[in-house]
Image (cartoon, grey):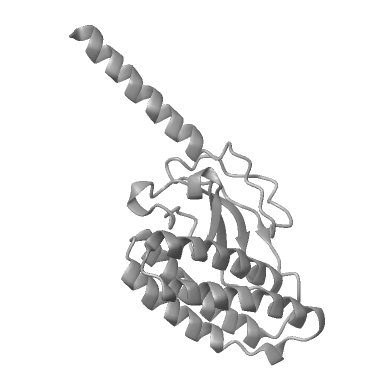
Amino acid sequence: MKIRSMFYSLLLSAASLTFLASCSGNKKDDHAGHEEHVAKDTTEHASGSTAAAESTEPQFEVDASFQNQLAGVFTSYVELKDAFVASDASKVKGEAKQTDEALAKVDMKLVSGAAHNDWMNYLTPIQNSLKEIQASTDIEAQRKAFSNLSDNLYKSVKAFGLGGKEAFYEFCPMAFNNEGAYWLSDQEQIKNPYFGDKMLTCGSVKEKLK
């Protein structure tokens, strides 16, 4: 009986080590819309702790009103992200609607030239993702749409900034069967929207935006 007990203990230890290794982000975390990662990646994310990520400045100088309106979208998005952390599909639908309403207040006339073209390229995928989230009651389908929403909102924040408001670009290597997925947060502390309390602190900060 002692030998069998020791055997089971070894199996549990091996499983725990496998989980921690997967959550540590050893998997290659390529991202089509991510032009460059920060020089110092954070790796201590199995426990939710992170090293300080480097800040990056916006790519375009745009009207402060536009930045403030985009910051309003980001604020609503964070509430949506928190609903995913809670794994509450009904609340997710409601927060997606609020985010959509905040998005409608962004005045595209405040940006011009290349900045305007980029915003229009990001706007449609963001709108479509929010519609998909609102149309579904399946939390996993909602999470898939949220991933696409996060990708395009990240590009928007990186391009235009939030008028000094900080955003943290975070990554979970285990999302969607180890494909990996990103999200934005207003804090460095990891609260994973793709797993909720199943793996709440699995992830890392990849970039700090402002």
Left or right: 6, with 144 as reference point: left
Left or right: 136, with 115 as reference point: left
Q: Position of residue 62 (x, y in %)?
A: 72, 82
Q: Nearer the viewer, residue 105 or 195?
A: 195
Q: Position of residue 132 (x, y in %)?
A: 48, 73
Seen at 75% across and 70% down, the residue is: 59
- Residue 89 showing in the rendered view: yes
Seen at 68% across and 51% down, the residue is: 38
Q: Nearer the viewer, residue 59 or 133?
A: 133
Q: Where is residue 46, by image quadrant? A: top left
Q: Quadrant of the N terminus?
A: top left
Q: Is residue 113 above or below residue 195?
A: below
Q: How many marks can you see?
A: 0
Q: Quadrant of the C terminus?
A: bottom right
- Residue 185 showing in the rendered view: no
Q: Nearer the viewer, residue 209 or 7?
A: 7
Q: Position of residue 40 (x, y in %)?
A: 66, 45
Seen at 70% across and 75% down, the residue is: 121
Q: Position of residue 14 (x, y in %)?
A: 40, 23
